[in-house]
Amino acid sequence: MLTKADEDEKVEYNIGNDLKDQAVGLKDAVVKSFKSVGNIAKFKIDTLTMSDEETLDSDAGGNIIPSIRALWSDKYGPIRAYSFMLYVLLVIPCAVAMGALKQEFGWKMLGMQVAMLSILPYVVSTIFFNVARLFLCR
C-alpha cells in the first residue's frame, strides 16, 4: 500500500506527452541530417589519393608500411595470406550470433561452439600453412 509521501512523489506517465517528445526529437534529427548533407560536398577523402613512398614512410605509423610489405613479400607470403584467410573465415562470429545461438540452443551448445571455433581455425590454418609450405615452396 502506498503512503501519502509515496503518492506525492509518484510521477504520472502521460503517453501523449511522451509521443510528442519523441516526434519533436525525430523532427530535430531529420533536420540535422538534411543540414549535414550539405557538408558532404565539402568533405574530401585524402586516403583515396595515391602518395609517394616518402610520404607513406613519414606518416604517423613510421615504418609500418615497409614492415607490412616485408611480411607478405617473402616466399611464404601467399601461403601465409591464405592461411590467415582460412583462420578469419573459421573464427568465432560476432557476439550477436553467439547470443542467438545461446537463446536458441542453450549454454551447453554455446560452450561447445565457442570451444570448437576457438581451436578449429588455428588447427586448420596451421595444417594448411605447413602442408602448402611442403608442397609449394621447395
Image (spheres, rainbow, N blue to C red):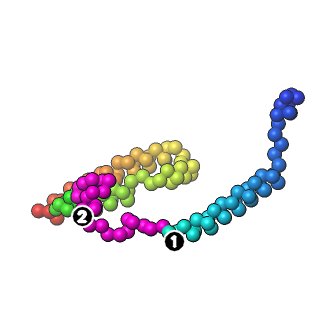
User: Which of the 4 image quadrants contains residue 38?
Assistant: bottom right
Position of 77 compared to 26: left or right?
A: left
Amino acid type shown at disc 2: Glu
In the picture provided, is 124 more to the left or to the right than 11? left
Image coordinates for residue 2, horizontal then vertical, percent: 85, 30
Number of numbered discs visible in the structure rendering = 2
Judging by the rendered image, the residue that carries numbered circle 1 is 41
- Tag 2: Cα neighbours inside 10 Å, few (<14), some, or many (≥20)? few
- The residue most toward the right is 4
Q: Position of residue 56 (x, y in %)?
A: 28, 61
Q: Which residues are magenta?
A: 43-67
Q: Residue at x 30, y 51 (%)?
A: 123
Kindly give the residue lying farthest to the left in the view shown: 138
Q: Nearer the viewer, residue 110 or 6?
A: 6
Position of residue 99 measured from the top left corner of the image (x, y, whole percent): 53, 49
Q: CA distance from mark 1 to mark 2?
A: 29 Å
Residue in the image at 24% along x and 64% along y = 53
* Residue beneath the point at 83% across and 42% down: 12
Q: Where the C terminus falls, by quadrant?
A: bottom left
Left or right of residue 78, residue 45 in this image: right
Q: Is residue 116 above or below residue 83?
A: above
Q: Which residue is mark 2?
A: 53
